[in-house]
Image (cartoon, grey):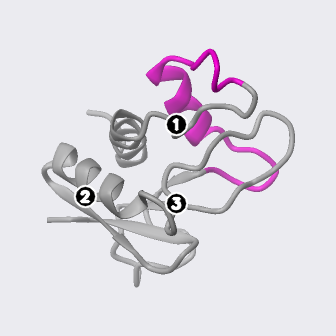
């Protein structure tokens, strides 16, 4: 079975056509697998989707954490959710795809994924 972070990243790129696209590649989008890899790639400022609750944003109970601030630097990609745009709709749709988990915003920069 795939890890929580992988399942969450797959759900996010399925519902959001830009999530995980590297900047400068919007005119020739990458595959879903490439976009998932971009969200999970650990750069100098971390990943966009992490396993568990590494910083305690979800009170220690999250199965995955989604970071929603641009990382910057070479190879950066479009963040998976945007609190101020369509992020809520995408989080609901991604939660529906996961079936056994749901995404909940902690604040404008972090969302956590909890088991149902």
Q: For this view, does 19 lie left or right of residue 14?
A: right
Residue pictured at 24% horizontal, 62% vertical: 102
Query: Is label 2 in a helix, a strand or a loop?
Result: helix
Mark 3 nearby-residue class (10 Å; few <14, some 14–19, many ≥20): many
Q: Percent x, y for residue 51?
A: 46, 55
Return the disc, 1 or 2, that comes first in the chain's sequence. 1
Q: Secondary structure at mark 3?
A: loop
Which range is magenta?
Answer: 25-47
Q: Is residue 32 magenta?
A: yes
CA separation in Å, label 1 and label 2: 16 Å
Q: Is residue 102 left or right of residue 33?
A: left
Q: Which residue is mark 3?
A: 82
Identify which residue is drawn at 57% across, 75% down.
55
Quarter holding residue 104: bottom left
Residue 3: % across, % down: 36, 42
Give the answer, above or below, for where 43 lies relative to 102: above
- Circle 1: element type: loop
Our reading of the magenta stretch's main secondary structure is loop
Residue at 51% x, 40% y is 19
Mark 2 sits on what residue? 92
Q: Residue at x 57, y 19 (%)?
A: 30
Q: Position of residue 70 (x, y in %)?
A: 71, 56
Q: Earlier in the sequence, mark 3 or mark 1?
A: 1
Q: Which mark is residue 18?
A: 1
Q: Quick one: label 2 or label 3, which is nearer the N terminus? A: 3
Location of residue 54 in the rendering, given as x and y in whole percent from the top left corner: 54, 69
């Amino acid at each position: 079975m795939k890890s929580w972070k992988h399942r969450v990243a797959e759900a996010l790129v399925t519902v959001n056509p830009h999530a995980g696209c590297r900047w400068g590649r919007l005119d020739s989008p990458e595959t879903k697998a490439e976009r998932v890899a971009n969200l999970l790639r650990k750069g100098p400022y971390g990943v966009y989707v992490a396993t568990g609750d590494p910083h305690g944003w979800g009170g220690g109970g999250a199965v995955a954490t989604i970071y929603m601030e641009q990382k910057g630097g070479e190879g950066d990609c479009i963040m998976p959710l945007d609190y101020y745009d369509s992020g809520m709709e995408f989080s609901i749709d991604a939660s529906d795809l996961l079936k056994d988990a749901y995404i909940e915003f902690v604040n404008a920069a972090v969302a956590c994924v909890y088991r149902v």
